[in-house]
Structure formats: C-alpha cells, structure tokens
Amino acid sequence: MRISVIGTSGSGKTTLAKNISQRLAIPHVELDYLHWEPNWVEVSNDIFHQRVTDALKSESWVVDGNYSKVRDIIWSRTDTLVWLDYSFFTVMSRVSKRAINRVVTQQEVCNGNYETWGKLFSRESIILWSLQTYHRRRREYPVLFQQPEYSHLNIVHLRTPKAARDWLLGL
C-alpha cells in the first residue's frame, strides 16, 4: 500500500500515519523532516523534491503532510489518500493543545526544531497557520480530487477522530 495522509495542521496526520505504519509494518515518511533543516531553515525546492522522490522509492509506505510543492510526486504514486477533514473546533483545539504542550515540554518538532512562546505568538505560529488554511483546504481538496491525474486515488474521507480510529482498526 502507498498511503498519503492529508488534512489541516493539527488534525492528526502524523499520529494516524505512525499508527498506519505500525499496523501495516510499512515505512512512515514525515514530510516535515524532509522539508525543515535545523533552526527552521527550509530546504530548496530541488532538494525537497529529491528527498521526497528518494523516500517514496519503496513498494509500500505512508506519508503525511500537505506540501503542495511535492503533491504531484506524492499523489501520483499514492493509491490511498486519507483526508482528515475534522470540524474547525476539533482541529483548533488539537493544534492549540499540541503547540502549548510542545512549548512547555520542549518536545522536538523535527530536526532539532522546537516550538517557542515567541514563535507561538508570531506570524509563524502553527495555530495561526491552521486558522489561515483550515477553510482553504476544505475547499481545495475536493476540487483537486476531481482532477484527471488523481482519478486513480482511493479517497478515504474521515470527518471525525472516531471515524479515523474505526478505519484504522479495519486495515
């Protein structure tokens, strides 16, 4: 299986992808690790494309993330696309709790990068990013799913965390 998990930041993409990886014993590819260098430095598009291409060479995998600049690479190789399309309240409460917890516990996000109080209350805040992208993603994805180049995708549209748990148990 080649699975891509998408959804607004804070919806639980990485958690679900890790669970899928464990359940199916397939590699988990977390796009944030391929995109961010230490000190929150973004890699160039060329390097990001190459890293994603290399990470998806195996027969089976689960990848999580919403990076549009590599969507064509990922979705063209994906057979099952899982869309976590949770309510605004669910996403915002999850992303807020997660961000605050990461700041307080100094939990690493990726590649030695951490959330900070300063970042949390800046224009680079993950909470602000979720606010800005939530409605756009909900409009954007159904349009993308109708594109001919993505007609091969088996789309699993999950609207609640319970639906995601039930789907995972059915794998």
Image (tube, grey):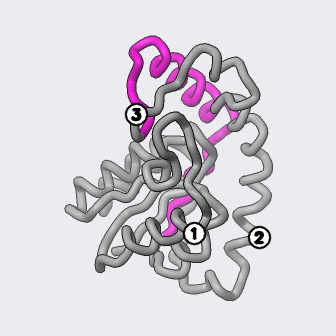
Viewed as shown, does residue 34 lie left or right of 149?
Answer: left
**Between 40 and 32, the one nearer to me in the picture:** 40
Q: Quadrant of residue 149?
A: bottom right
Question: What amino acid is labelled 2 in the image?
Answer: Val
Which residue occupies 69% across, 87% down?
148
Q: Quadrant of the C terminus?
A: bottom left
Viewed as shown, does residue 76 lie left or right of 59?
Answer: right
- Residue behind mark 3: 112
**Alpha carbon distance from label 2 to label 1:** 27 Å
Q: State the extent of the magenta-drawn residues as a range.
A: 81-110
Viewed as shown, does residue 143 lie left or right of 30?
Answer: right
Which residue occupies 42% across, 68% down?
3
Of the two numbered discs 2 and 1 in the rendering, the one whose residue sits closer to the viewer: 1
- Residue behind mark 1: 46
For marks 1 and 3, the one nearer the N-term is 1
Above or below, 96 against 56 in this view is above
Residue 103 magenta-highlighted:
yes
Are the residues at dot 2 and dot 1 in contact (C-beta closer than 8 Å)? no
Above or below, 22 against 155 in this view is above
- Residue behind mark 2: 143
**Alpha carbon distance from label 1 to label 3:** 22 Å
Question: What amino acid is labelled 1 in the image?
Answer: Asp
Above or below, 121 against 53 in this view is above
